[in-house]
Image (cartoon, rainbow, N blue to C red):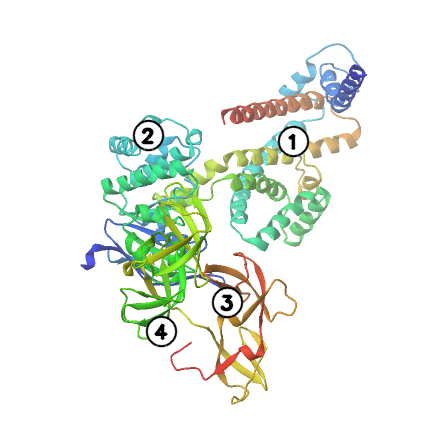
Amino acid sequence: MAKDERIINIEHLSKSFGDKKVLDDINLYVRRGEFLTLLGPSGCGKTTLLRMIAGFLQPDEGVITLDGRDIAGLPPHMRPLNTVFQRYALFPHLDVYDNIAFGLKLKKTPEEEIDKRVRRVLKLVAMSDYEDRDVETLSGGQQQRIAIARAIVNQPKVLLLDEPLAALDLKMRKDMQIELKEMHKKLGITFIYVTHDQEEALTLSDTIVVINEGKIQQIGSPIDIYNEPVNAFVADFIGESNILKGRMMHDRRVAFIKHEFDCVDEGFGEDVPVDVVVRPEDIYFTTDPAKCQFTAKVNSCTFKGVHYEMWVDTDTGYELMIQDYDPYPVGSEVMLYIDPDDIQVMKKERTANNYPAKVTGEGKVEFLDTEFECKTEGFAEGDEVTATIRFEKVDLLDHEEGADLTGNVVFILYMGNHYHLTVKTETGENIWVDTNDIWDKGDFVGIKILPQDIKLSKPAAGNE
Amino acid sequence: MKTRSKIFARLYIWLILIILYAPIVFIAVFSFTEAKSLGNWTGFSFKLYQNLFTGSMQNSSGLLSAVENTLVIALIASVIATLLGTVAAIGIYNMKGRRKNVMTFLNNIPMINPDIITGVSLFLLFVFLHISQGYTTVILAHITFCTPYVVLNVMPKLSQMNPNIYEAALDLGATPAQALRKVLIPALRPGMISGFILSFTMSLDDFAVTFFTRGTIGLDTLSTYIYTDARKGGLTPELKPLMTILFLVILVVLLVINIRQSKNSDKK
């Protein structure tokens, strides 16, 4: 790809608010004229990234270039970018016309030119007869149109949109999505769009950037992101999915839910633990015993408008979600199969909790800012070691008493027969836990680790 | 039963109103007679009004200059307090957490603090700094006690405002100064106006602070003039028409503000 196709280039961008790292080493480029969406849950850092591009925030580290020029020192009013804000941010003391003309008047554009351009954008956002109206008398959707008009009338190189449709109702949001897409085509301006709504991102974007906890998880086209999520977070966040523990037997052969399946993935090695994603619409019912790969019992069946959503219990004790146009009665035994193409195998991000630790005495080790008891045979006081705890060996308590440390549940994945939880400790470290207990996101938990479950080892070179 | 309690409620309201307004009505009525001592009606006359406007009063040429001082001081002090208070409010609004609470608390103290303490402490401060007391010190003192009221009036307007509109202005190419003038100030204007009016009236009727900061050059505002005048024995009769006029002016201002406000809220 030619370098000048990139209108915005972001390298090694980091930002912290106090102790909290909001963005961590972001690398990203935006192609001229594309519709790029920053997608992630609230608090993931996507709005912070947008505000840094707009110039309202300064990065701690890293470079943002626009057309090859570093824009770090450029204040917002000097940047050839315009923003559409989440809650419109129209000027309440000005009418529709003066709101839109605001930027042009500041640039001392001739009166006739202003008039021509304001009328043109009003027509573009289908608000032609509203120029004399007081902005506060307009509905939410109309205000958002004016906000878009106010931004594009300045003919920015890039239009930044910060969850512009979040405040609108569902019907209005759908209509505006279509209009935004058409506007983008007509104007040929590069759009950078921030949203937490995965459906909106899939509908609108040329490129989606999935962000979580300040880090880019995946960059790709909507189809890539949906069909080939790179990790469990992306798979869970985009659309519905069955995320399962698996094992790559050898190339093109993977085992999960205690069955073996053909797949199309290669290069993972032999007998390697992996994560597997199967979309609920990719599990098929069959009546042909030759096709059947495994059997299951229908547990629940709900009508969802276009399709039915069913939960089934497999013969091996896993729960799977299936979407199909035809319902199957609850309690019935069904035969199922999955196409090799529809099995997405992902490298396991981690197989156990590993922490840098320090032996602080006979039978004592410190990690996560906490002292734990464990066997320290073979190590002396002061040794730097790695402490390993298996996911299922971490106990969660609903109270602080007897706990070694405390934290909050920040992310929950259902893995077919157990939950995989991410717990953030008070000091901001993550502990991953496998459990059969049901917790909610945000729950405050006590964390207990028994001495025999902590395994110490010499830290491997180059490893955390 | 119902009608009786209604009548009682009416009577009660009228009683309160009479107690509140009787003294003012009393002065207003007796401003239209020539009698020197209050309570003596010697026939209807505009004499006192004439004296007031032609300045031909016995022994009291100081009255008109006191009125002039009062108005000039109130105007300068409230204009400066409005500017300072608005900027301070924007600053406090943009603070976070504890700092914001501490600043709001510090802003509230001078309003609860008795005037006499403000007056004496400012007096001591000016003496300590060797600032000769007079016009300037009175204005400085008035700015001091007016500013917190402006902050108090502007803050709610800031919280009502969409926090993005300042950034939106920058985004559309306004320099920070232009954004302040073209977007922020118009949005805060109602709060600034009410803060200004409150400051103006507070300054107008202040006695304690003025008394301690006016120094010994013989500077008099209306309140200190009346105080000295009363101590000399008897009030100057022309004060009665002056009070009446002042009361009417303030009444009109209040009416105008109220009508404007109700018009604004009708519009929304």
As rendered, which of A460 and A98 lies closer to the eye?
A460
CB-based contact (under 8 Å), mark 1 and mark 3: no
Q: Is residue A76 above or below residue B252?
A: below
The crowd level at tag 1 (other Cα within 10 Å; few <14, some 14-19, many 20+) is some
Q: Which mark is residue A272?
A: 4
Q: CA distance from mark 4 to mark 1?
A: 95 Å
* Callout in the foreground (4, 2): 4
Residue at mark 2:
A127
The tag earlier along the polypeptide, 4 or 2, is 2
Q: Earlier in the sequence, mark 3 or mark 4?
A: 4
Foreground: disc 2 or disc 1? 2
- Please state the chain letter of the residue tagged with numbered disc 2 in the rendered image: A
**Relative to residue B171, is residue A334 depicted above or below?**
below
Q: Nearer the viewer, residue B79 or A273?
A: A273
A389 vs A294, left or right, is right
Q: Which residue is mark 1?
A: B66
